[in-house]
Image (cartoon, rainbow, N blue to C red):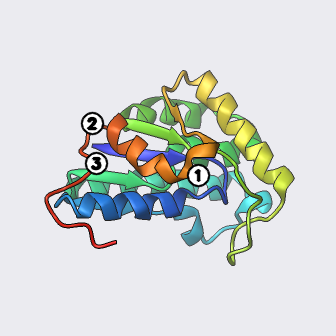
Amino acid sequence: MKLAFIGSHGVGKTTLCYDLAARLKRQDRVIELVMEVARRCPLPINRDTTVQAQAWILHTQVASEIAAAAEAEIVICDRSVLDNYAYLVYQGGRQAAYDALITEWIGTYDALFKVPIIHPPSFDGRRDVSQDFQAAIDQTIDALLIHFDVPCHQLDAGARDGWVDEVLVRCGLPLHGPQTELF
C-alpha cells in the first residue's frame, strides 16, 4: 500500500507522516517513509525554482517511491508527484511531458490525502514563508486534482487531532495494534 499526503508547504504533512508511521509501527507493520525530496535538491526551490529543479524533484520522488516500495508493505509519502508538479506549474506552466508522467504515476497511490492550510508557514531553513505563495500553491494543487481527475480525500481543518485515525480507517487499517500504547 502506498499513500501520500499532499498540500502546500508548511501545512503539517511531515508531522502527519511521522504520527501515522508511529501508529503503524505499533501495529508491527513494515513501513517506509518517503520524505520531501525538495529539501535535497541542489537547485533553487520555492519561488526561485526552475523547470530543471522541479524535474529533478519529480524524478527523485518517483525513484524514492520505487525504492521504498521494494522494502516495505506500506509506503507513506510526505508529498506526491502531483503536489511536487504544482510548484513547476506555478513557476513554468504546464509541461506536456510532465503531464504524461503525472497521469501515469498518480495511479500508483492507493490513497491521497489533502492536508489543508491551517497556519502560515514557519521558517525551517528551506521553507518559503510567504502566505501568498503558500495559498497559490494550494490553489494550483486543487486545480491539478481537478484536471487529472484524481480521487483525493480532503482532511478537515477543524479535526486535526483525528487525522491519523481518519487515514487509518479510510485505508482499511486497524486503529490499534497488538502492542500496548506507550503514550
Residue 120 in picture, x, y percent from top left: 77, 59
Q: In which quarter of the image is the C terminus?
A: bottom left
Q: Which residue is drawn at 79% across and 61% down?
A: 48
Amino acid type at circle 1 is Ala
Q: Is mark 1 on a helix, strand or loop?
A: helix
Nearer the camera: disc 2 or disc 3? 3
Nearer the camera: disc 1 or disc 3? 3
Mark 3 — residue? Answer: 175
Q: Residue at x 70, y 63 (%)?
A: 45
Q: Mark 1 or mark 3: name the one nearer the start of the chain.
A: 1
- The residue carrying pointer 2 sits among few (fewer than 14), some (14 to 19) or many (20 or more) residues within 10 Å by Cα, namely few
- Seen from the viewer's position, the closer of residues 134 and 12 is 12
Kindly check if marks 1 and 3 are in contact, taking CB atoms under 8 A apart as contact: no
Residue 102 in picture, x, y percent from top left: 51, 35
Residue 5 in picture, x, y percent from top left: 49, 48
- The tag on residue 55 is 1
- The tag on residue 172 is 2
Q: Which residue is drawn at 16% across and 61% down?
A: 28
The answer to whether any part of residue 125 appears in the image is: yes
- Seen from the viewer's position, the closer of residues 4 and 92 is 4
Image position of 112 (left or right of 67): right
Image position of 49 (left or right of 79): right
